[in-house]
Image: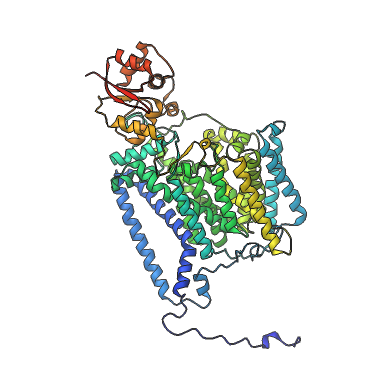
Amino acid sequence: MPNADPVAVAPPPVAPPPAGPAAGRPQPAHRLRSALAAAPAVVTDAAVLGFALWTVLYHASFLFGLRPSVTFLIWLVGCALITAVVAVRALRRARVPAPAGAAADAAGAPTTPDAAGAPTTSDPVPAGGTGQPRRWLLPVVAAGVVAAVTAGLAGTPAGDVLSWWVPAAAGAVAGIGAMLLTRRAWRADDAAPPASPVPTALQSGYALLISVGVAISSLYLARNTPDDVYYVGKTVWVADRDLVPTNDFLFTENVAPAMGSLPPTPSIEVFDGALAHVLGIHGASATWYLALPVMAVLAVLALWRLTHRWAPRRPVLAFSVAVTYLYLVAGSDAALGTFHLPRLYEGKGMFVSAVIPLMWLYLTEWFDTRSRRSLLLVFALSVTAAGLTTTSAIILPMLVGAAGLAMLLVGRWKDAVVGGLAAVAYPVGAIVVSRLVLGGMDAAGADDAFFDAEYTYRRTLLVGIVGVISGLALWCGPLLARRRTPALLAAGAALVMSVLLVPGVLETLGALTGISVVLWRVPWLLALPTLIGLLCTVRVPSPSRLLRGAVGGLVAAAMVTSFAVWATPMWSKDSWVETHTRPTWKLPQQRQEIAFWISRQDRPAGLVLAPSTIMRTSLIVTSRVRVVLPRDFYLVEYDLNSDFAKDRLLLAHFADGREKPARDQVDAAVDRLGVGTICVYNGNRYARDMAVELGFKEFATRPGPGATTCYGRAG
């Protein structure tokens, strides 16, 4: 009856819930699916809270003079207590019957479908994830394409005739346009944010499986990084001595002032060293065999969570493309793939690979829910970032500024201020306190290398086809992200990055802040792998679901093919990576064997002079062997015109066979530095003869490969 009052139609009867203790509770199979679906979130959130607790305890240990092993045991007790409290609360909640309709949510059923190509409640507009007007969409996309193509061609023969002002101007237009479109879509949308997508058990299981596979592969890839002498060397020092070096530990026995560019605020190296000391294993083994696989799992799950939250459709495909990008696009010393598995154990690698995507995720949740839990996670993640790298005090304010700007433009100033303070207060405060209290933090001698906007793009986003894809992700990604908060935050990031890429902006920022040396890292504020994955979520206006899904698959296949053909994979020797058939330390095996061989010798007192690569390896093998020059790059901190620096450089070049200094020069440098042992390759005849002339006596010989002879000072 078309004219009948619909209110008068009685609804069908609803069967009452079954009686008994299981009423309103999910069944065991549902509980298992729910646990699997929630596992990535539980694992990453617990890791963030746990490492934040460790970082706070580590910083507090300076006040009480605690040894790292004691701090580590206190941390274990704290983690156990927190876990017990959370478990008790969870059990109490489980005993309370769930309200009607809550069982499906508890079982992990998504509130917005994630089926490939299917429209969702958070993506009602076929043209994109933001609901932007079509008449303005095309010009913004066109500007983004122009910026991506011209930026990707910069530095190549085809782009030599183009001024960087072309991609910079087009990128600024695209960034501003995307910001205005997402802002307009936000204001035109409903007041209440859409329900957050919940992963299914199958999706989370796939992410967990990929993360475990990545963790296993981390054991077989080895990249010899010169910075390891500091990062892993510090871990080995802590493991050997159960002591945090607050002064220099590379050139001296914790005596000379610490390097100004590397204050002792990061806690990750001390954590690995304390873990090794408590377990009674080598510090390098704790780093590369225990910590690295765990970090790999967390980094992949962090990438999955942000990609799932921001992707309007096909999140599994977008995540798969993002992981493939990290594996296939390495080579460059600043490529994000290089900072993933090959350097993940360095705090800055974990920062860009895990903290950045999680910070965008937590800020998305904070702006959507305004819950105390999400704000706590933002703060805890900022503490974790401070414990990983001092770079967090530079990049996080930029990231938070991008997110805050986006929220200010839609009138959410209070949420932007509160979330921003939670995200930057601890990292910035830790640096300020370390400079004021601990001393020895003057970075005036830091390296003055600087990369302008064009070279900054080329170093991280790369050139050629890969650079074009990176540019499309940067300037078109916000138009593909899930509507409201994800799209708005992605647009904020694109706008800030577009401004930073304008010629002269980085120069001015460096002059005002004195941080020119690290400004090439500003692309880290982008969740670039996620944005690249979003490219395959593009949706064409077509009534055919099959066609819509095929377009995403074709885009993904084209991108992966481009990475495979035109990029350098992570496992390539051109990425300075060696692959092994068994888990191994991240060192060239011959250097490692020689360094261990020298450490086992009964040597005279004094410093060890050896080829530069062996000296750099020695401090990773043991902190008990003191060498003449751990790494020449660090001498810039100690005045290159001083005898302290000149003597070390002269002797290192002498041991390398690169120079043949006069006997009186070598003799004077050896005396001033207190060299007790000289170990050189047998092929360096000049150094071997000179050692004998200086009164050193041969006491050990190692056969080839890498044949080496050691000489000790008589008496």
Q: Is residue 178 left or right of residue 695?
A: right
Q: Is residue 507 left or right of residue 214?
A: right
Q: In the displayed image of the protein, which residue is found farthest to the right?
A: 135
For image coordinates 40% across by 51% down, the residue present is 51
In the foreground, 156 or 405: 156
Q: Locate the N terminus and report the quarter of the image it occupies.
A: bottom right
Q: Which quarter of the image is occupied by the C terminus?
A: top left
Look at the image and name its color scheme: rainbow
Give the percent coordinates (x, y) of residue 154. 67, 35
Viewer can see residue 248: no
Residue 96 in sight: yes
Tag count in the figure?
A: 0
| x and y, in percent, of residue 311 in the image | 61, 57
Q: Give above or below for 202 relative to 509.
A: below
Q: Residue 712 lies in what quarter of the image?
A: top left
Residue depicted at x 31% and y 52%: 74
Q: Residue furthest left?
A: 715
> Where residue 429 appears, x then y in whole percent?
45, 44
The image shows residue 48 at horizontal and vertical percentages of 44, 53
